[in-house]
Image (cartoon, helix red, strand yellow):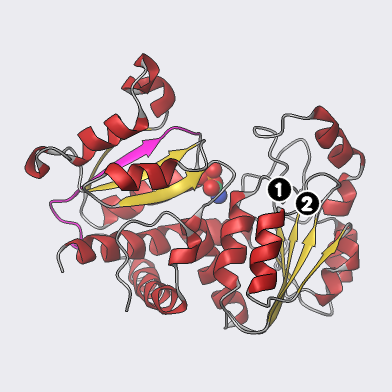
Amino acid sequence: MEKLYHLTKAEQLTTSIVADLLKDAEGFNKSLKAGVRNFKNLSGVTICSLFYEESTRTRFSFERAALLLGATVIGTENAAKFSSAAKGESLEHTIKMVSGAAKGHLGYADIIVLRHPENDAADRAARVSSVPIINAGSGADEHPTQALLDAYTFQKLLGRLDHFTISFIGDLKFSRVVNSDAFLLSQYPGVKMFFVAPEGLEIRPELKSYLSQKEVEFEEASDIKAVVRESDICYVVRVQKNRIKDSELLLAYQRNKDNFAVTEEVYKMSQQKGTFFCHPMPVDEEEQEIRPEVENLPRVKMFEQAGYGVPVRMAILAKVWQNTKI
Ligand code: CP
């Protein structure tokens, strides 16, 4: 099987790697449920949690995963301001220093978990790092560990990763999660994808070309109500206000936001199909793409989904560390 060392893109997550990691994640999940807290997989290991962009779930779940596995965690939640990036240091110099590129035994960390606003940041970091880089979100491009925890969620909900229909809904142009999820799921037979986005925020042409090349069946639509009855999973994402430069695009979304939201009407429409609703979170409190009146209903799974971040990231960290030694 391919060896996972750096994890920068969902395309690295082959079906055999996914199966292996999901099996390990299930083991960690069961142990956590049984009350185990003192895993030893990363005993003596230091994880650097290097976040240049804001995060709640990814950072906390990675840090909790590392601590549960027995690692020490160093890092910053705002590297743009609190690391020497604020003094003009390049990402490459930071990574070389932290990873001990000059003299390995003098490095500061054994694995670096990196979130960064630039699309190519994780690949740039991997090129100069002497320890594994795990991409915890790079610009609007990739979020491979979210794709893995989503795959874990879909498998838990449906019992499989093949032969199902998923609708991605919302701002698909700037969503790194949708990009990574679509890459990962494109490898499985019989996965049909609907893409439901406001005008100007549709999925990127490169992703469409990739899916066509992989012979994935997909269709575009402009209203969740047109696809929900056919969907096993509706995967909703927020409008990425932090990345949209053209205010007209945001206004276009806001004018039609009911078309991209899980409302009571949408939930009721999906009763017969039994559609599950997922969301990587955060939900935008102003736009309410998952309406408060449905967020605690049984088929809305976003909180459970976010919780799976812990065992899935435990599996990733343990595997990557194990692979440094073989
Ligand atoms: N899903 C996700 O990446 O959430 P955070 O931005 O809170 O880490």
Quarter of the picture containing the C terminus is bottom left
- Examine the structure image and report whether residue 51 is included in the region drawn in magenta: yes
Q: Amino acid at mark 1?
A: Lys
Q: Which residue is mark 2?
A: 202
- Residues under labels 2 and 1: Cα distance? 5 Å
Task: Using the rendered image of the protein, determine whether residue 60 is visible from the camera's viewpoint.
Answer: no
Vertical side of 95 occupied by 36: above or below: below
Figure quadrant of residue 80: top left
Vertical side of 299 occupied by 104: above or below: above
Residue 104 screen position, x and y as percent: 11, 44
Q: Which residue is mark 1?
A: 173
Vertical side of 219 occupied by 159: above or below: below
Magenta range:
40-53
Residue 158 screen position, x and y as percent: 62, 80
- Examine the structure image and report whether residue 284 is included in the region drawn in magenta: no
Vertical side of 8 occupied by 25: above or below: below
